[in-house]
Image (cartoon, rainbow, N blue to C red):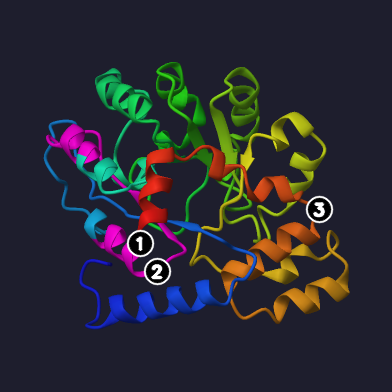
């Protein structure tokens, strides 16, 4: 939920999400992210204008819809971070999501090593925003560099660099794609995702993946839902008849898959994440 949200907004968003999932026949499962509050290094919450989507809410939605797998958000500076991680793992969480420029965690900080070691022990991947950000407020732009992910990678965590370090705008922000590529080549446990790549700025990077089979094999499909999915962003890269067909797809979740398929992304790209998620979470979902 958004702090100060209009009454009933959560229920409307829930209904829209469930409808979009039901109209996405190409998608077997999605990982739905929570979003923790911002914290300072002293472990105290910071009063900043941003989103807050509790882990319990995402865990509940995963019980209510068969396609949803819960991705929790736990700020590592929270005093109860390790306990929260253990609780969420027991409840079926399949990964942890961080958005450092908005939430304030420094992925390179040595004090997070116990959290990384716990993630590695549990086999739970860590998805960390990298590159440009324009969807939520940015308070720590210095935390967008994927180079900061090395401590987690060194601990053996499967780390997914959200957006693969790419820009979200045309200017006034660095492009960390080359840094991501170096990490992906160096670390077998380093991956990137294609979240928000069906947009005018980021769609060009699909061609860069397709030209590099080694890095392509390290990419994970991501949607960045509910960020808009724009079929016309593929002009010049996707045949016009396909753009017209894709633009008519009602579910943005299904439309996002269609854009990437039309741009040439292989079917294996859409299955990479499944092999990274903890088996215990899959068992819990199947039993549920």
Compared with 18, 281 (above or below) is above
Q: Residue at x 48, y 67 (%)?
A: 226
Horizontal and vertical percent position of residue 167: 59, 46
Marks 3,1: beta carbons within 8 A: no
Nearer to us in this view, 172 or 222: 222
For the point 71% across and 77% down, the residue is 247
Residue 58 lies in magenta, yes or no? yes
Task: Identify the magenta region.
Answer: 57-86
Point 28% across, 41% down: residue:
89
Whether residue 44 can be seen here: yes
Under circle 3, the secondary element is loop
Quarter of the view holding residue 59: bottom left
Residue 51, visible in the rendered structure: no
Q: Residues within 10 Å of mark 2 (few under 14, many from 20)?
A: some
Q: Earlier in the sequence, mark 3 or mark 1?
A: 1
Which residue was labeled with disc 1?
62
Q: Tell me if label 1 and label 2 are in contact, CB under 8 Å.
A: yes
Q: Position of residue 90 (x, y in %)?
A: 25, 43
Residue closest to the eye, 217 or 259: 217
147 inside magenta stretch: no
Question: CA–CA distance between discs 3 and 2?
Answer: 30 Å
- Give the camera-side residue of 172 and 123: 123
Residue 122 vs residue 175: left or right? left
Identify residue for label 2: 65
SS at mark 1 in the image = helix
Locate residue 223: give its quadrant: bottom right
Q: Which residue is label 3 attached to?
A: 264
Q: Nearer the viewer, mark 3 or mark 2?
A: 2
């Amino acid at each position: 939920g958004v702090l100060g949200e209009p009454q009933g907004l959560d229920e409307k968003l829930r209904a829209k999400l469930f409808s979009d999932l039901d109209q996405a026949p190409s998608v077997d499962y999605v990982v739905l992210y929570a979003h923790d509050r911002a914290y300072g290094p002293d472990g105290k919450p910071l009063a900043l204008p941003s989103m807050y989507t509790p882990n319990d809410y995402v865990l509940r939605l995963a019980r209510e819809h068969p396609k949803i797998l819960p991705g929790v958000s736990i700020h590592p500076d929270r005093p109860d971070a390790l306990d929260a991680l253990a609780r969420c793992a027991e409840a079926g969480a399949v990964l942890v999501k961080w958005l450092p420029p908005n939430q304030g965690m420094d992925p390179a900080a040595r004090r997070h090593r116990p959290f990384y070691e716990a993630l590695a022990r549990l086999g739970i991947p860590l998805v960390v925003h990298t590159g440009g950000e324009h969807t939520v407020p940015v308070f720590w732009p210095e935390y967008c560099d994927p180079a900061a992910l090395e401590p987690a990678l060194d601990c053996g965590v499967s780390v997914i660099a959200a957006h693969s370090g790419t820009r979200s705008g045309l200017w006034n922000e660095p492009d960390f794609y080359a840094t991501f590529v170096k990490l992906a080549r160096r670390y077998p446990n380093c991956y990137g995702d294609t979240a928000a790549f069906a947009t005018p700025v980021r769609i060009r990077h699909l061609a860069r993946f397709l030209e590099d089979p080694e890095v392509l094999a390290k990419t994970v499909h991501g949607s960045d839902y509910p960020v808009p999915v724009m079929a016309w962003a593929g002009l010049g890269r996707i045949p016009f008849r396909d753009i017209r067909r894709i633009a008519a797809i009602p579910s943005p979740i299904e439309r996002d898959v269609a854009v990437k398929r039309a741009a040439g992304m292989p079917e294996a790209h859409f299955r990479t994440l499944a092999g990274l998620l903890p088996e215990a979470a899959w068992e819990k979902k199947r039993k549920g």
